[in-house]
Image (tube, rainbow, N blue to C red):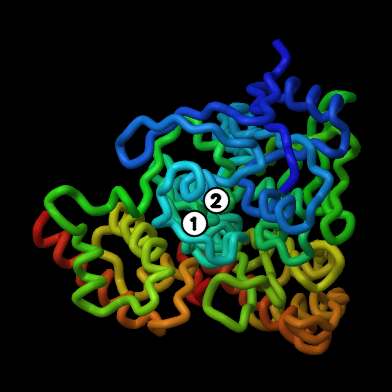
């Protein structure tokens, strides 16, 4: 059977932050454009739009990706976690609380990407060294903080999450 | 980006049929971390994304009974360093997979895509060369094999003919008492393009070298297999004197350019230094240890 060629507005069914989501996207549109422009999920930011800055980081099928380097149509039948799904109805995620307590942000544009990236790290490695935090977060650029407070916030959140189990 | 179509074939034959039907404006999509950006920024004449990740052969990572590994061309980097058996068998490829872009890039980017992009500084390519990888190619005239050192032909150019696609890489079983290592020089700690990259393979009989391969990145229009440097090591005692002699050959073979990342002189010297470090790392692996000189 010949492969179906999709064009125009393609219907995509996926799961975002635990909810089944349907959207229409042209094949040329990135997952970032779909999230921001079609679904109103503007937490993921467009920074460089070429995979360097990490401001659009989301977790796709359990793995950290840059949403600007994924096509929206590639999200079909996948599981996406965005910054909007990090907090729970009970309150902020420990990473979010730690970023606040450590003043790990200034302008805030990079922050959603950092938090999603750090969440992916702690799900992989609950007890990272400072070196491992810096290495993992190397794909997230921040022009305000100088990174020290971000790294400290991630290490503190990791410790709290281990203590709370 | 202009209007583009998308297809997700589930067999190599279907993908090849799509390439045949749509010509050079159909592009194979693996991790997309190069292709999506290229299409967006360069306005390339892409009309069709052929998403290869639904083809089982393209995302394969299996070790056969004889120890040979088949690495699907679209298998993402993170699956390589997450696989303990792969890490033990192909350390240089894992060294490269860990430093291609960021964690987010490695979640999608594939070694096969890195190879097809044929960048002179592509980190995985010297590593594939020292591991003697074979490229498995499919096209309108059936299947063929290309030695990985012959795959890249110029910056951004590879030896795939019209309608052909890279399906997988065959990685020979690592010989006993052998080791490999890849490393690069960049002025930052991470997230940069190699000023020079160097890979090495060593096989030992006691202290004596019985086989060796050296490859360099970013010192020529294509990643460079420095066959003479490897051959010069055969029969030598593994150690600094032999490594320095091989590194001199690597330095003299390198034909780099001056650009924003480095000068000819700097790259020549780096070829000399990094070849020795790659050899020390390969030696450490061959002796059952791990290299101590970082990434």
Question: Could you tell me which residue is drawn at 67 percent across and 78 percent down?
Answer: B274
Q: Are marks 1 and 2 in contact (CB under 8 Å)?
A: no
Above or below residue A77? Residue B201 is below
> At 75% across and 35% down in the image, what residue appears?
B48
Q: Is B223 above or below relative to B294? A: above
* Quarter holding residue A134: bottom left
Mark number displayed over residue B104? 1
| Picture coordinates of residue B161, whole percent (x, y) | 90, 38
Q: Residue furthest top?
A: A1
- Asked whether B13 or B178 is in front, the reply is B13
Q: Is residue B139 above or below residue A141?
A: above
Residue at which label 2 appears: B77
Mark 1 to mark 2 CA distance (whole Å) = 10 Å
Residue A36 drawn at (x, y percent): 48, 50
Residue B88 appears in view = no
Instruction: Please identify the residue farthest to the bottom as the structure is shown.
Output: B265
* Residue at (75% x, 44% y) in the render: B2
Q: Nearer the viewer, residue A124 or B71?
A: A124
User: Can you see residue B155?
Assistant: yes
Q: Residues within 10 Å of mark 1 (few under 14, many from 20)?
A: many
The percent position of residue B141, horizontal first and vertical second, equals: 89, 24
Q: Secondary structure at mark 1?
A: helix
> Which chain is disc 2 placed on?
B
Quarter occupied by residue A97: bottom left
């Amino acid at each position: 059977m010949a492969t179906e060629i999709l064009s125009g507005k393609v219907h995509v069914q996926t799961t975002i932050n635990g909810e089944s989501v349907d959207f229409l996207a042209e094949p040329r549109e990135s997952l970032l454009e779909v999230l921001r422009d079609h679904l109103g999920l503007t937490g993921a930011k467009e920074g460089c739009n070429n995979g360097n800055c990490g401001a659009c980081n989301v977790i796709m099928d359990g793995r950290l990706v840059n949403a600007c380097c994924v096509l929206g149509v590639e999200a079909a039948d996948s599981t996406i976690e965005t910054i909007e799904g990090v907090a729970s109805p009970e309150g902020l995620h420990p990473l979010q609380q730690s970023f606040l307590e450590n003043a790990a942000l200034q302008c805030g544009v990079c922050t959603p990407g950092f938090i999603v990236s750090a969440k992916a790290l702690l799900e992989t490695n609950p007890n990272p060294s400072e070196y491992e935090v810096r290495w993992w977060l190397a794909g997230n650029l921040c022009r305000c903080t100088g990174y020290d407070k971000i790294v400290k916030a991630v290490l503190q959140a990791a410790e709290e999450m281990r203590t709370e189990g | 980006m202009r209007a583009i179509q998308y297809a997700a074939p589930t067999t190599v034959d279907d993908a090849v049929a799509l390439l045949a039907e749509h010509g050079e404006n159909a592009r194979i999509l693996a991790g997309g971390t190069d292709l999506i950006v290229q299409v967006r920024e360069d306005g390339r004449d892409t009309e069709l994304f052929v998403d290869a990740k639904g083809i089982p052969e393209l995302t394969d990572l299996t070790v056969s009974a004889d120890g040979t590994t088949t690495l699907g061309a679209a298998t993402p980097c993170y699956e390589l360093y997450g696989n303990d058996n792969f890490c033990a068998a192909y350390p240089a490829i894992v060294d490269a997979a860990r430093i291609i872009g960021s964690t987010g890039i490695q979640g999608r980017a594939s070694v096969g895509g890195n190879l097809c992009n044929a960048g002179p500084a592509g980190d995985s390519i010297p590593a594939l060369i020292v591991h003697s990888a074979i490229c498995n190619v499919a096209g309108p005239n059936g299947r063929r094999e290309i030695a990985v050192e012959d795959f890249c032909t110029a910056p951004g150019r590879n030896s795939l003919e019209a309608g052909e696609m890279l399906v997988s890489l065959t990685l020979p079983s690592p010989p006993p008492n052998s080791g490999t290592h890849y490393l690069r020089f960049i002025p930052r700690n991470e997230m940069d393009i190699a000023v020079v990259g160097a890979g090495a393979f060593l096989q030992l009989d006691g202290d004596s070298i019985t086989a060796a391969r050296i490859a360099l990145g970013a010192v020529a229009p294509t990643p460079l297999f420095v066959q003479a440097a490897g051959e010069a090591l055969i029969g030598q005692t593994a150690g600094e004197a032999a490594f320095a002699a091989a590194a001199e050959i690597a330095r003299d073979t390198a034909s780099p350019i001056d650009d924003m990342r480095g000068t000819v002189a700097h790259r020549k010297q780096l070829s000399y230094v990094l070849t020795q470090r790659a050899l020390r790392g390969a030696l450490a692996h061959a002796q059952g240890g791990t290299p101590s000189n970082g990434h």
